[in-house]
Image (spheres, helix red, strand yellow):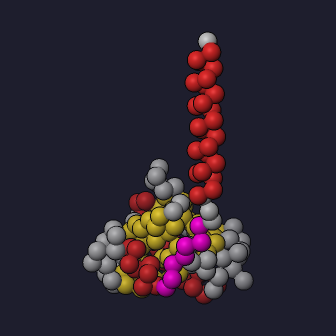
Amino acid sequence: MNTLAISIGSNVALGIVLLAVLYRRRGPDEVRLADPVDALRHYRSVDPAAQGRALLASDGRAALLELDDGRLGLVERRGRRWAARELQAVEIAGIAAADDGMITLRFADFGWPRARVRIEDPALRRRWLDRLDALRAGAVAGSSVRREAHDA
């Protein structure tokens, strides 16, 4: 019985020490996209030959890409890594826009259910909402962007 108590106690102490070490190593994630070239570089992890233009989100945590061949792409910070994907009509389950400039894309994807891109410029935000809605409308007849608030 005494050895069991010692084993349990040492495992609890070791667990507390490991949690403390992990907590201290966990810091704020201040990594942001530097510029459109940086966004395109991250997108090339899924499409090495991709060429195009990127629009950085206002907070630098995401980018929407217009590729030269007409496709659209997305780069977003997911945890401590950059994730990139081509935006395809059948994968977009919904699009929402808010007054604060946030565009939320909902995906039919268990591993990546949504993405958020903040575009503060109303003209750019409208342009991208129109592009995304047109893409989604290609797969779902009669779809429309659900507007949570009107752009100013």
Of residues 68 and 75, the one nearer the viewer is 75
Q: Is residue 49 magenta?
A: no
Image coordinates of residue 24 in percent, x first then y, are 63, 56
- Going 47% across and 50% down the picture, which residue do you hit? 110
Determine the residue positioned at 49% across, 85% down. 35
Q: Which image quarter: residue 8?
A: top right
Report the residue that reaches farthest toward the left.
49
Q: Is residue 1 visible?
A: yes
Question: Does residue 51 appear to the left or right of 125 in the view shown?
Answer: left
| Residue 152 to residue 111: above or below | below
Q: Is residue 130 visible?
A: no
Residue 12 on image: x %, y %: 62, 32
Residue 9, compared with residue 103, is above or below; it is above
In which quadrant is the C terminus drawn? bottom right
The relative height of residue 42 versus residue 36 in the rendered view (above or below) is above
Prevailing SS of the magenta stretch: loop
Residue sitting at the far top: 1
User: Where 84 sits versus 21, above or below?
Assistant: below
Q: Nearer the viewer, residue 152 or 63?
A: 63
In x, y percent, where is residue 27? Answer: 62, 62
Residues drawn in magenta: 29-35
Q: Residue at x 60, y 87 (%)?
A: 123
Q: Which residue: 70% across, 75% down? A: 100
Quarter of the figure with the N terminus: top right
Locate residue 47 relative to residue 144 in the image: left or right: left
Let me know if residue 33 is in the magenta part. Answer: yes
